[in-house]
Image: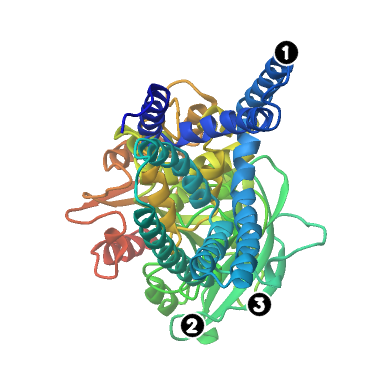
């Protein structure tokens, strides 16, 4: 059968547009926003009033075009609303379809309604997955619709078989997604009332609340959670939480070891104190030995983890103040002692924090006696780290990690606007990534959706040479200033923080005249260098013994 040229040309055009948009899902979202406002009034006009005067038709097109342009210009709030609209719309539509199927006793529509209900459940919790589904629906619909228009005589039986297979497949996929969603959501930590503080915030370092910590702890240790007052980088008051391990009373000394944890995420629910392993060797290398020596160990969550508010990710001043105030609060516990030696140890992000603690301690907490500083695999130069992340292009993991930096920086610094670094249709993706913790099962979804976005229309566009974000990254580079002996340790095979950064950090620190011990470990990765079998751990205690004399 000969296909009319209008059908042929429009079908081919639909397929070509779909193929163009398929590898550009973010662009597809913008096109969808432009098309929908235009298509709806125009379709209504052509369907309802085909013989109305031409001026009215032109007016409808102009009005639709204006609405469409406004939708594209204000894409960000509309794109952010789409993940909410989609599951609600699916839920309402599926209930209506289910009622219809029950009344007519139709199996296939009932299965389709079930698939939609399960999909709506999953998409409600995962806004980035909902957006991704919307983004790929448009090009796939154009491609499939264009191909089917070229097959007008396709047998009805073939269509029924295809619809049946698609419905069953959709039911299986949506069911699997719903089960996975329920499983992943069950693993997300929930903030209990311990972390809520509604009263006034007293002076920094004040101990506000004490509670038992019920996770795994070293032998002969008394585990506790504490809530304490601190300040953010800009000086505003804040509340932070921490875990503390106190040694047995008959072995207790006045030494406090402050541990700064590595990257766990940037949301409230990523606090180590919410996990059952916050006081184990897995979380704090060498904690068993520290407790056996009678040291008190305190590990802050920083503000914004556990508690609400801004989280100071790679914001040195904020990390440093929270750590120093955690030490002050821990010294307020019975049997610890108000004065004594304080050691600072940290890994990765915590290594960055540790260096800043030492850098600001003399001014912020002059009463504390810092005896030793150990920065392990330290992200001492956030700009160097950002350059490494972006060097290989728009990688999926790079996009997720970048969200951990951009979201806190946009909340901390008024001149860092997310809109300047994120694709107009990508803000909801970045915010979704920033809500997930590194150890959450749903972190896999972040990586998968970031990978599915592709690189034809990049999610992020960060100028690391000349931008407000780059300037603040540069400003949060540790100077190396301090007077206490410094230990720097890192695996040579570190895949996260460039090993060259440790040598640069050591050079900056030596310029201040302080003693620096630098160690590098062959065959050790970013996390492998602090594993229980790593030679770094005994080296660390040997170094501590040598400086204690």
Q: Is disc 2 in contact with disc 3, using a CB cutoff of under 8 Å?
A: no
Q: Residue 258: x percent and y percent?
A: 50, 62
User: Nearest the camera: 171 or 5?
Assistant: 5
Q: Residue at 65%, 68% (x, y): give it.
A: 99
Q: Quadrant of the C terminus?
A: bottom left
Report the residue marked by disc 3: 211
Report the disc number at residue 251: 2
Disc 2 crowd rating (10 Å Cα; few below 14, some 14-19, many 20+) is few
Q: Nearer the viewer, mark 1 or mark 2?
A: 1
Q: Relative to 327, does residue 310 appear above or below in the rendering?
A: above
Report the disc number at residue 55: 1
Q: Earlier in the sequence, mark 1 or mark 3?
A: 1
Disc 3 secondary structure class: strand
Q: Residue 24: x percent and y percent?
A: 40, 33
Q: Residue 392: x percent and y percent?
A: 29, 35
Q: Quadrant of the N terminus?
A: top left
Disc 2 secondary structure class: helix
Q: Earlier in the sequence, mark 1 or mark 2?
A: 1
How far apart in space, not on screen, are marks 2 and 3 (Cα)?
22 Å
Q: Is disc 1 in contact with disc 3, using a CB cutoff of under 8 Å?
A: no
User: How did the renderer colour the structure?
Assistant: rainbow
Q: Nearer the viewer, mark 2 or mark 3?
A: 3
Q: Is residue 132 visible in this depiction of the protein?
A: yes
């Amino acid at each position: 059968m000969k296909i009319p040229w209008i059908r042929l040309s429009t079908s081919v055009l639909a397929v070509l547009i779909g193929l163009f948009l398929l590898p550009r899902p973010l662009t597809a979202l913008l096109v969808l926003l432009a098309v929908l406002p235009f298509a709806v009034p125009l379709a209504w006009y052509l369907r309802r009033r085909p013989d109305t005067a031409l001026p009215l038709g032109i007016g409808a097109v102009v009005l639709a075009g204006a609405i469409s342009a406004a939708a594209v210009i204000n894409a960000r709030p509309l794109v952010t609303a789409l993940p909410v609209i989609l599951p609600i719309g699916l839920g309402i539509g599926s209930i209506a379809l289910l009622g219809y199927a029950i009344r007519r006793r139709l199996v296939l529509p009932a299965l389709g309604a079930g698939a939609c209900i399960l999909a709506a459940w999953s998409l409600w919790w995962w806004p980035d997955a909902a957006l991704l589904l919307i983004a790929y629906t448009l090009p796939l619909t154009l491609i499939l619709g264009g191909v089917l228009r070229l097959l007008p005589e396709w047998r009805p039986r073939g269509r029924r078989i295809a619809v049946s297979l698609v419905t069953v497949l959709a039911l299986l996929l949506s069911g699997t997604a719903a089960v996975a969603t329920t499983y992943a959501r069950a693993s997300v930590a929930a903030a209990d009332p311990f972390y809520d503080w509604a009263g006034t915030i007293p002076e920094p370092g004040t101990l506000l609340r004490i509670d038992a910590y019920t996770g795994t702890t070293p032998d002969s240790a008394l585990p506790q959670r504490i809530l304490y007052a601190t300040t953010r980088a800009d000086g505003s008051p804040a509340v932070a939480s921490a875990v503390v391990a106190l040694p047995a009373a008959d072995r207790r000394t006045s030494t406090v070891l402050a541990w700064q944890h590595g990257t766990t995420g940037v949301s409230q629910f990523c606090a180590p104190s919410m996990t059952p392993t916050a006081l184990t060797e897995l979380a704090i290398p060498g904690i068993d030995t520290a407790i056996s020596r009678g040291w008190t160990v305190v590990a802050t969550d920083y503000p914004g983890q556990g508690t609400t508010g801004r989280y100071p990710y790679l914001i040195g001043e904020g990390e440093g103040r929270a750590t120093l105030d955690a030490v002050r609060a821990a010294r307020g516990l019975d049997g610890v002692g108000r004065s004594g030696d304080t050691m600072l140890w940290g890994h990765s992000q915590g290594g960055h924090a540790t260096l800043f603690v030492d850098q600001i301690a003399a001014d912020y907490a002059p009463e504390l006696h810092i005896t030793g500083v150990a920065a392990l695999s330290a992200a001492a130069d956030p700009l160097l780290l950002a350059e490494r992340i972006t060097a290989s292009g728009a990688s999926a993991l790079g996009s997720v990690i970048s969200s951990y930096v951009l979201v806190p920086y946009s909340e901390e610094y008024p001149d860092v606007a997310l809109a300047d670094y994120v694709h107009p249709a990508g803000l909801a993706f970045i915010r979704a990534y920033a809500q997930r913790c590194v150890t959450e099962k749903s972190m896999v979804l972040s990586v998968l959706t970031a990978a599915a976005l592709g690189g034809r229309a990049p999610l992020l566009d960060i100028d690391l040479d000349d931008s407000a974000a780059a300037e603040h990254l540069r400003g949060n580079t540790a100077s190396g200033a301090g007077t206490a002996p410094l230990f720097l340790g890192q695996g040579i095979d570190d895949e996260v923080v460039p090993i060259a950064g440790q040598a640069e950090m050591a050079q900056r620190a030596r310029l201040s005249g302080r003693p620096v011990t630098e160690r590098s470990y062959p065959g050790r990765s970013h996390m492998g260098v602090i594993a229980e079998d790593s030679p770094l751990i005994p080296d660390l205690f040997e170094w501590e013994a040598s400086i204690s004399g």
